[in-house]
Image (tube, rainbow, N blue to C red):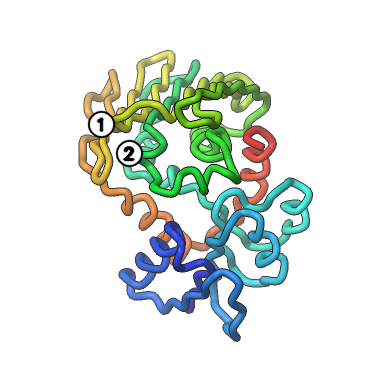
Amino acid sequence: MKNLVIGYKGSIGSRHYRLLREAGEEVVGWDVGEHPECKPDMTWICTPNSSHYLYAKDIDGKMFIEKPVTDNLSQAELLRGKQIWVACNYRFHPAIQVLKENLSKVGKVLYCRMHFSHYLPFQRENWKEYMKDTNIVMDVGWHFVDLAQFLFGKICQSTHIGATRELNGIMDMAQIGVFCNHDIPVMILLDYLRRDKSWGIEVIGTEGTIELRCAGKHPEFAWLFCTTKGVLFAEYTGIDDMYRNQLNYLLKEDWKSNLDEVMEVMKICG
């Protein structure tokens, strides 16, 4: 399978390019702005957000596009019918996959709490430049809103609020609330203030609770506990693990576009 990574010199593009090579796949890299002749089986668009649509509109084959798929919903609508997978890498975190497989252990889900906390300058060396085009809701909130619908079904209602602190000079705290599948409330708390990285999920049901805790970075320790079944997962994971799982899914599975689901996330996150 021949792969083309557009934007292969950037932080996320270089990761996909490297993982494709490690997987033994044929891969060609373009820098941003390059348009050499190439007919790949799958194209990976890892360019600045504003250019995603400019590349995607002219591609007929399979595509991976980093989030957000486009600058706005109107552009995303024009991509309907194409086979597109928009980056949803948290779905492929090993502990998230085990959590989803074991949701039935808690009975009927009553509600869920999610959180993510990490100091922004510790995440990205170029954070000031990166955050010019995004905010905490669109950046990390995107993944947790997507996880809500991945775990519990279609989002029916949502709200969010944010706060700006002088520490980073951007919106670095937010709270998002969504209802999934008509009756499952999910509360998501986000901040870019905590010096040590921590994120997690609690699912409370009629028959028990599943709690996922993740701490640390490169690698992080993930611990998943179910009150009815005990420890389900307790491992150190590298950041490449979820990206590699996502890549393997797209290379080996007969996958369907997730554009409709992503557009629901865009409506909430902006």
Q: Residue at x 41, y 22 (%)?
A: 203
In the image, residue 99 above or below residue 114 = below
Which label number is shown at residue 95? 2
Considering only order in the chain, which callout, 2 or 1, is on the residue closer to the N terminus? 2
Evaluate whether residue 149 shows in this view.
no
Say which quarter of the image contains residue 124. Answer: top left
Q: Residue at x 42, y 60 (%)?
A: 247
Disc tally is 2
- Drawn side of residue 118 relative to residue 8, left or right: left
Q: Which mark is residue 223?
A: 1
Residue extending farthest to the bottom is 37
Amino acid at dot 2? Ala
Q: Observer-nearest residue: 227 or 13?
A: 13
Estimate how packed mark 1 is, as few (under 14), some (14 to 19) or many (20 or more) residues with alpha carbons within 10 Å. Answer: some
The kind of residue tagged 1 is Trp
| Helix, strand or loop under label 2 | helix
| Rendered location of residue 67, percent (x, y) | 56, 50
CB under 8 Å between discs 1 and 2: yes
| Marks 1/2: CA–CA distance | 8 Å
Out of 186 and 167, give the one closest to the viewer: 167
State the quadrant of the C terminus.
Answer: top right
Residue 30 drawn at (x, y percent): 52, 75
- Which of the pair 71/260 is nearer the observer? 71
Q: Quadrant of residue 56?
A: bottom right
